[in-house]
Image (tube, rainbow, N blue to C red):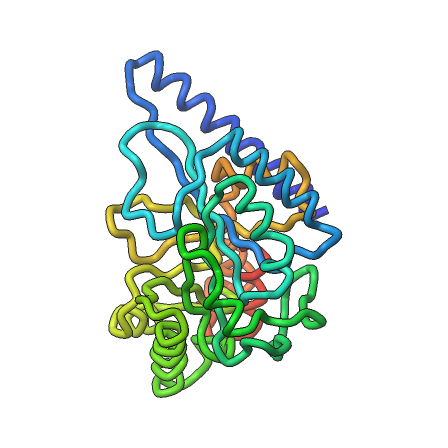
Amino acid sequence: MKRVVNLVISGVVQIGDMLARSVGRLLGRKPRATAVVLAYHAITTGQRERFGRQMDLLLRLAKPVHANLKSRPSQGGRYAAITFDDGLQSVVDNALPELKKRGIPATLFIVTEALGGPPNWQSFESGNAAHEMIMSAEQLKALPSDLVAIGSHTMTHPVLTAISEEELQRELIGSRAKLEKILDREVKLFSFPYGASNAVVFDTCRKAGYERVFTALPVLAFCETNEFVTGRVRIEPTDWSLEFRLKLAGAYRWLPTAYVWKRKLLNGFRRVPKTSSAVVREEKKIA
């Protein structure tokens, strides 16, 4: 039911966007480009065909770009970057061949201490990937650098807002150093496990040398030149076609605002600590 409600509200947002563009054209305004970053996790063998159809739809409706894009293109149009969290083996087996076939670039965010082993962290995803394996360091090194960019997803996949400053620095710096040693190239991108982040985490990421970090909030991307904090839209291979179209259009960007107001109402307008595991679960629900 919640999925349907989100779909309906997002449909209304999209209709509003279309009306605004129509009015803008009547007034002689040049339409602005829009961009989103799509966030996937696992792509199982049974989901490969559906994922391929999503990529075909993406190519019809948008232009694929790299997640390290400096800013939105000056010309109008719709743009999308593809990302995958965790570095699961199923992505190597099922997603990357479909992307290579279509020439679509992607960014993989890697948990360095899990390479070659199973995920050993709690998952709030609808399709728990605990039974999967993480790709090996050798597979990571062999990925085509012209198609696949690599970013960090920490060393051990903790909730970053719930660990000490010393542990935070170790997770951010250690993962980046290990990836750069494996790949023999710089790693400048980072995504937050569970989407958990705050001002302290952002600042530590900057000091650790990252040039862009990715949240789990489904807002439009690349809105500023050299944007540091970029939102992502959570995507599942099982998303309905209309769902995928609306997410690609950025029509789910209302969800973070709705979440903020929901949290205020449920907690009597009292601030809820971001280290709360309940907040992490809620942020995953809207991402």
Q: How many marks?
A: 0
Please tell me which residue is depicted at 68% across the width and 69% down the height of the picture: 132
Please tell me which residue lies in front, 165 or 1: 165
Q: Looking at the picture, how far across and down is residue 164, in whole percent?
A: 39, 86
- Which quadrant is the C terminus positioned in? bottom right
Relative to residue 141, is residue 247 depicted above or below? above
Q: Locate residue 112 relative to residue 213 in the image: left or right.
A: right
Q: Looking at the picture, how far across and down is residue 143, in whole percent?
A: 48, 60
Please tell me which residue is depicted at 68% across the width and 49% down the height of the picture: 48
Residue situated furthest right in the rendering? 46
Please tell me which residue lies in front, 227 or 252: 227
Please tell me which residue lies in front, 160 or 259: 160
Q: Looking at the picture, how far across and down is residue 6, in whole percent?
A: 61, 43
Please tell me which residue is depicted at 32% across the width and 64% down the height of the picture: 188
Q: Quadrant of residue 19?
A: top left
Q: Looking at the picture, how far across and down is residue 230, in whole percent?
A: 37, 54
Q: Quadrant of residue 7?
A: top right
Relative to residue 198, is residue 169 depicted above or below? below
